[in-house]
Amino acid sequence: MKSRLAVALVLAPLSIAALTPLAAQSPVMPTPAVLTIHADQPLHAVSPTLYGLMTEEINYSYDGGLYPEMVRNRTLRDGGWEQQDWILLQNASAGATMSRDKSTGPSAALTNSLRLTVTSASAAQPAGVRNNGFWGFPLRPQTAYRASLYAKADAIGALTVSLVNNQTGKAVASATIPAISADWKQYSVTLRTGAIQPSADNHLELTVTRPGTLWMTLVSVFPPTYNNRPNGNRIDLMQKMADLHPQFLRFPGGNYLEGNHLADWYDWKKTIGPLVDRPTHPSPWGYHSSDGLGLLEFFEWCEDLHMKPVLAVYAGYSLEHEHIAPGKDLAPYVQDALDEIEYATGGPDTKWGAERVRDGHPAPFAIPYVEIGNEDWFDPSHTYDARFAQFHDAIKARYPSIQLIATAPITSRKPDVLDDHYYKSAEEFFADTHHYDKSDRNGPKIFVGEYATMEGTPTGDFGAALGDAAWLTGLERNSDLVVMASYAPMLVNVNPGGMQWHPDLIGYDGLSSYGSPSFYALSLFAAHLGDTVPASAITGAGPRLFYSVTECKSDGRLFLKLVNAAPQPQSLRIELPGTATHGQATLIRLHAATTAATNSLTHPRDIVPVTTAVALTGRTLAHTIPGNSIEVLEIPTR
Ligand code: AHR
């Protein structure tokens, strides 16, 4: 349960009472609050899956983000392709035109290609096109990039693929394909950089030296990936997610599951298999999705980070208030969901399991949860109850052990789990931390599938972290009922035009990434989850102090999480009756001077946890938590 975060570590044998270096900023409250923890009185188990991730294609989360393809609009499906993505190289002595040809492509799925018609070109004056990438091509020194494309040509000869620095106009890596055939074929080369400075100020050039015609599509430049997976994920973002200790991944959305219109639903069958067979699709967040990160890649992402898949299946409702009527109209979608589950979990003797094996993943995946739809409370036709029932009955008949998640309250069936979403201000979260204290324990379990304190942009500020952390203390306290929780949205490309929603948890450009203060709070909470909630009570605390206590029974550690959302410090007497404390406790503190303080791409570590060792002095601990602070106190009890 140790945090893998690189935190500033300060080891000093202090008494807890002495841990108040920040308290000098404002007076300590005169009467300490008393927090009594009865570690010998367990109340209930903590959900081991409480902390996880929610993901969808938004904010250039995949294309231009986690899916590290560097060529933008690689299959020429996005509008505006010739203004921003693909540009004809200006060369006064070479003659060439560029157009989008919608009549030819290498597969039934990809029928758009870029046609370059060259009337004059030579080795001294090549003709060609450039691609500007997703806000440039982020290149690092001594790195091998795999470039590939599908192409056919009429008398064009060799094709040179180069990564070119925008400032110098010089190639930093280059390779030549000796000849392009008359029929569609895939070509690939390796582009190796030398001793360059890491920079995104680069573009891709594809050039020829002879007149003729060239058609190209699915042009790709791929960097090294996490676990070296072909067509895999960006390394630093995967490491950031690993630091959140996630137990599950909810995918593929969110609104991304639904699409704006019925025709735009997440049709998973079009996202599997070779990339050349993936037609791509419009996403509801204003840009086209390459579907390079498709259904199998979601499961492999789970595999890489040891997360349980929470698979959301399309349930016949799309965002523009369009729905499929339950009954015979919905039946094909129910069958698609069954096929989807079979694709992930089936053996080679099943139709869709065999498809997964063909796609390169022989081992089946386990799916503990399937979510039916997304935010179906928005559906004005009020058909969700009947739509849910139709999916429920079909899935349970074939997969009785899969837990089914409803996205809105229903009455015709009892869902195993209900997905609640909360986007609130910090003040609203402070006022709502007891939300689940009195909830019915005989109803469905709760999945808080989306939550975020709506403060800060592009990522949440420290005030947002206080709101999120306070809210999480309530979820931990109720983790007999709340089985999972995930922040949303998780990722944001902070380049101009990259963001559709704020705040987000992890920000990045092409080369680097950072975590918001909430990212660190979530990471700390998840790294110190515990397995049992013991009885506890607090008296005399200010209204902006929030806490939760869990215990790790197996190795005898108490985890006390404290959130002080007031600007003043709060002094505390922690009573531990019936507990033998031992040795040294560990205090991890996340603090900022103001609620507006934040992390950013240029100041990624302004707010990070600081760890201090604390000498224990018996069963009563005096402790002061500074204003604007989130703390985890880890107390060994044997
Ligand atoms: O997280 C952003 C969006 O908020 C999700 O796509 C949707 O489920 C919710 O409304």
Image (cartoon, grey):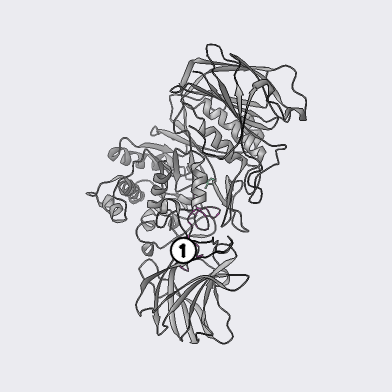
The number of numbered badges drawn on the structure is 1
Up-down relation of residue 58 to residue 133 (above or below): above
- Residue at 51% from the left image edge and 41% from the top image edge: 243
Q: Is residue 371 above or below residue 145?
A: above
Visible residue check, residue 294: yes
The spot of residue 68 in percent (x, y) is: 49, 57
Badge 1 density bin: few <14, some 14–19, many ≥20, Cα 10 Å? many
Of residue 146 and residue 475, the one placed in the foreground of this image is 146
Between 397 and 13, the one lying in front of the other is: 13
Quarter residue 618 falls in: top right
Residue 322 visible in the picture: no
Asked if the stretch drawn in magenta spans residue 57, the answer is: yes
x then y, percent, for residue 180: 38, 78
Reading the image, the residue beneath label 1 is: 145
Amino acid type assigned to the residue bearing label 1 in the image = Tyr
Measuring 45% from the left and 43% from the top, which residue is drawn there?
250
User: Which residue lies most toward the top here?
Assistant: 578
In this view, which residue lies farthest toward the left?
A: 349
**Quadrant in the picture for residue 454:** top right
**Is residue 167 rendered to the left or right of residue 254?**
right
Question: In the rendered structure, which segment of residues is drawn in magenta?
Answer: 56-76
> In x, y percent, where is residue 183?
34, 77
